Image (spheres, rainbow, N blue to C red):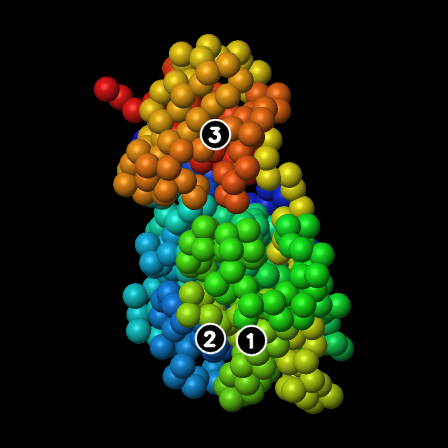
Amino acid sequence: MTDQADLTIRTGPTGPVLEFDFPSMYIGTAEYPDGPTGATVFWFPNKAVGTVDVRGGAPGSYNLDWLRQGHDFPNLDAITISGGSWYGLGTAAGVAAALKDNAHRSGHWNNLATVAGAIIYDYGLRRLTPYHPDDRLGRAALSAARPGVFPLGAQGAGRNTMQGAYFGLWLHSGQGGAFAQVGETKIATFSVVNSVGVVVDRSGAVVAGAQLLPENAKHIDKLLAQIPNELYSDRNSIMGRRRRVGNPANTTISAVVTNQKLTYAELNRLAVQVHTSMGRMIQPLGTVNDGDILFAVSTAEIENPGLHPTDLAVVASETMWSAVLNSIPHIDPYSTTETTIFEPAELSQTFKFGTEGLVEVRQTGNNLTLRSIGECSIFGIEPGETLVSAGREANSFLFASEILQRIAFKRDSDGKVMLVLNPGNWQQIGKILKA
């Protein structure tokens, strides 16, 4: 397994982007594709005023107390959002150190780099690798930062996000952004959507995963109305599916940035008002399993007496809804280009994932069985549990499971067989266990 320090870094947009006009804010992303996991950095070269609103029951953060001091003057250099749970907080320290190392900031008490950050949980059933965003990835994201471009979908901190676990749904998510301008006032909103709840559009329809829900549960009102009767129902129900997937661990991190001057109290209320509005677009929001945090930032460049802070927050709230909708990646989650023919004996191996996951594979004819023999669950396969393939498509074996949909095999640079779970953008790769 590759050491953390030797991981390949990928920076910059690799997919769709939001383009907008906000020269005083730079945005950069960096990823470890081998995770997959990543980070997103918002840098304000001339500093900015910032505050924060925390709603989730399990937040993970860096330097938030600095934002709670009530300062009305610009004193914030950057905000980082990263995967890796607590281990990903090193991203923020990396950005701060990079600002000092490149002489943008120094060691003088009145010129220190001030960075705040928050993390999402992107381990667990979705990811079996031990890798996490770190100092090196934070530095790379800052180096790649530029104004007016925000990568959408499964990029940056949104590289390995999920949504919908509360309802037993296994839906890939991402990061979204949107922009509005009222007179001279610029309003940019961003969200890394890694929510326990589902994303809902302005009509109340469940956006992603609706095809997996019963006909009478595709609208959020009808879906939520079924929950009291579903809590202890059979395994084929919505809640039964959630029990099989396990307790979710998620977090949605968001930011609203404006160039309009606001007092600290007004900026703080902007954070509260926009974060409260997000309960319309993500349901449920702010649960004990979420670590939801929203940053509100003002670059304090212009005054606009014609736009009251409450009106600004209303516009920002609607813009945030667009940002959340833009977070959903519109790509095929599964793909395989492997055309090599494998002998049954080559596939009948034990494969290791990360540091704890072990999967025993056996093939007889067109049928294939997977058995978890390690200490941890593998894509929902509990230790000792066996899954039997339900079919075959080209070079992939298909499975009737909430999480594991298909597997494929490929060869590494030495010609050795590797097992690929859910081949594609979010795949996990296991290597043959050495005797």
Q: Which residue position holds label 2? A: 55
Residue at x-position 38% and y-position 68%: 58
- The quarter of the image holding the N terminus is top left
| 403 versus 294 height, above or below | above
Left or right position of 365 against 66: right
The numbered dot on residue 275 is 1
Within-10-Å neighbours for mark 3: few <14, some 14–19, many 20+ = some
Q: Nearer the viewer, residue 241 or 38?
A: 241
Of the two numbered discs 2 and 3 in the rendering, the one whose residue sits closer to the viewer: 3
Mark 1 element type: helix
Q: CA distance from mark 3 to mark 1?
A: 44 Å
Residue at x-position 45% and y-position 13%: 344
Discs 2, 1 touching: Cβ within 8 Å: yes
Residue at x-position 50% and y-position 65%: 231
| 350 versus 157 height, above or below | above
Query: Which mark is first along the chain, 3 or 2?
Result: 2
